[in-house]
Amino acid sequence: MAQEGICYPRAGLDGAAHHALSYWLGTPEPDRNFEQSPMVLALRKEIAGASKVVISSEDLHTHGARGARILKRLFAGHQVKVVFYVREHLSYLASWYQQNVQASHLSCSFDTFCHLTRKPLHTLADAWTESMGRENMFLRLYDRKALTGGDVLLDFVRIVGVPGDLERFQRKRYENNPSVSGNLLFIKRLLNNLLDKETASNMVNETTELAKLKPEFLGAMQVDAPLVGYVAGMYKGDRKVLLDRYGVEIPERSGAMAGSLFPDFATLRADYDLILDTAAARDYDIAKAMRMITLGDLSYLNGKRAATLQPGAI
């Protein structure tokens, strides 16, 4: 990328994305010591002379107008484009919830999470538009049917203007940010009731590895039709504003969302044993935490929830 004049700065990176830069935006430092901030000095030194600079972090969406203004100041003298991908509301909330259960000590139910974290997407986009200007905002629907070539990478490079055949770049051929689901996610949610945030957060890599044990431990989680309808109704106004103001049409979801049961009582005991035995053999911390809970008589739960969706429910 550097040979092509594209700078993906190392300054502000945390892993593959600029999460450290996003974290810095939320601290008091940009307001009290901007010009001498190590983040500002390192970034400005690294991007000097680059014809294109790309920063990327999904965490940037948590910042409002203040964060946008700081970034605009950071890149003063550059033309700044903001490429903002939005998801259909239920899949956005579900993905956010799954990530938080896996990577923090979140322990509430998904329906409670939907109620407590209501965040209309147009208000996020408006905050960035206010600072960057409507002409520099590119709001896109994160859906294969809406993306250039059905690929978010192709869609992104078309917007930022990277010409030529992309085969000249080496691309990762695997999913490096999987969503943990099913009974593994449920067991982590149970443990989160007993763990402090730091301890629970440190288990994120362990749960990522344990998710490879069964297909049901990865991907989407099943969401029942009543909650799907509730979320769709909650964001009806948001969908209209996004269409009218930004030309982004988010289809209204109806019926149940397919995925792994969360929890699946029919396999909960066997899955618990599989996860515990594997984690213990690998000397994972999550094994030590799991030994704090014991599954007793589960017969009361028999028939409380079907193991699969009814035909035609999706």
Image (tube, grey):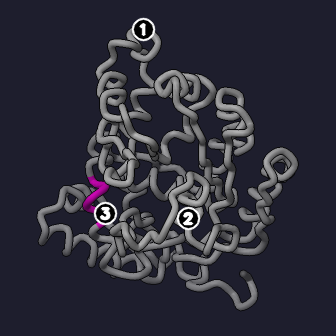
Task: Say which amino acid is labelled 2.
Answer: Val
Mark 2 or mark 3: name the one nearer the start of the chain.
Answer: 2
Q: Which residue is mark 1?
A: 32
Q: Which residue is mark 2?
A: 152
Q: Is residue 143 left or right of residue 206?
A: right
Q: Tell me where residue 263 appears, x and y as whole percent.
A: 49, 70
Can residue 85 be seen in the rendering of this structure? Answer: yes
Can residue 295 be seen in the rendering of this structure? Answer: no
> Is residue 207 highlighted in magenta?
yes
**Which of the two discs, 2 and 3, sits closer to the camera?**
2
Residue in front for this viewpoint, 162 or 266 = 162
Q: Tell me where residue 15 appears, x and y as whole percent.
A: 30, 49
Task: Say which amino acid is labelled 3.
Answer: Thr
Q: Which residue is mark 3?
A: 207
Q: How many marks?
A: 3
Q: Helix, strand, or loop for circle 1?
A: helix
Q: Main secondary structure of the magenta part?
A: helix
Residue in front for this viewpoint, 81 or 307 = 81
Dot 3 surroundings within 10 Å: few (below 14), some, or many (20 or more)? many
Quadrant in the picture for residue 129 = top right
Q: Are marks 2 and 1 in contact (CB under 8 Å)?
A: no
How far is disc 2 from disc 1 in space, using C-alphas? 37 Å
Q: Is residue 179 left or right of residue 93?
A: left
Q: Residue shown at 61%/74% (left/top)?
A: 149
Q: Residue shown at 38%/54% (left/top)?
A: 4
- The magenta stretch is 203-208
Residue in front for this viewpoint, 132 or 76 = 76
